[in-house]
Image (tube, helix red, strand yellow):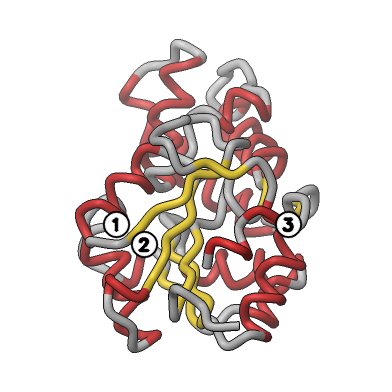
Amino acid sequence: MTRTYKAAVFDLDGTLVDSAPDIARALNVALSRRSLPPVTADEVRGILGEGARSLVARAVGLVRGPESAVDDVLADYTAAYTVDPVAETTVYRDALDAVAALRAEGVAIGVCTNKRSRLAHRVLESTGLGTHVDTVVGIDEVAAGKPDPQHLQAALDRLSVSPADALYVGDTAIDAEAARRTGVDYVHVAWGHHGVGESVIERFAELVPRI
C-alpha cells in the first residue's frame, strides 16, 4: 500500500520504552548520597522529557532538596545510570511490531530524544528496537534539544525527508511543541503522562494505519 508519510520519528523515553524504573533507581542512588529521600518510578514518569539536568532539578524539587545540590546529584545520577540504563527498561506494547512493520514497508524510522545519544543507542539495542531504527539524534548532538526545531529537523535531515513527509510520535507537551515548530504532523501516545492534543493513540497497533 502507498504510505502517507515517508518517515516516522519517535521520542524514546515514555513513548517507545518505559525507562522510568531504571531512571528512578539511578536518581535514588544520587539522592541518597545527599541524604535526600527517594522518588518513585511513577514520579519519574511525570518529570521526564527535558533532558537529564531538568529531570534532576525537578527530582530534587520533589524531595524538597536544596537547589545547590542539583549539580552534584546530576553527576552522581549520570554515573549511576550509565552503568546500566536497561536493567528494568521495557518496550511498550506493540512498539516493536509497529516499528518493524513500518520499516518493512519502506517507512524510514528515526528517534529524536532528549537522552544522550550513546545511552539512547544502548537502550534501543538492548530492547531489540535498534535493528529497525535508521537514525538516532540525541540531545548531545544538537545545540538545543526539543522543543527547539533544530533537534527534530536534524533527524529529518539524516533521513532525507521533508517535514511534510514525516510524522512525529511522542508523549509530552514538549514533543507536541517540537513537532509544531518543525512543521511535522504529530501523534500523541495515550500512555504518556502529559496528555496534549487530539491525535491520540491508545496502542501502537493504531499507528500503522495512520502512516
Label 1: few (<14), some (14–19) or many (≥20) C-alpha neighbours in 10 Å: many
Q: Earlier in the sequence, mark 2 or mark 3?
A: 3
**Disc 2, SS:** helix
* Mark sitting on residue 139: 2
Residue at 64% in and 31% down: 28
Q: Is residue 76 left or right of residue 23?
A: left
Above or below 132: residue 70: above
Find residue 143 and report its horizontal and vertical position in percent. 21, 65
Q: Residue at x 66, y 64 (%)?
A: 123
- The residue at 47%/30% (across/down) is 195
Q: Quarter of the image containing the N terminus? A: bottom right
Q: CA distance from mark 1 to mark 2?
A: 5 Å
**Tag 1: amino acid:** Gly
Q: Position of residue 47 (x, y in %)?
A: 47, 31
Q: Is 6 positioned to the left or the right of 27 in the image?
A: left
**158 left or right of 26 in image:** left
Query: First in sequence: mark 1 or mark 2?
Result: 2
In this rendered view, identify the residue nearer to me: 135 or 51.
Answer: 135
Q: Nearer the viewer, residue 195 or 53?
A: 195
* Inter-mark Cα distance, 1 to 3: 23 Å
Element class at badge 1: loop
- Front in this rendered view, residue 192 or 66: 192
Q: Residue under label 1, please give it.
A: 145
- Residue 86 disc label: 3
Residue type indicated by callout 3: Val
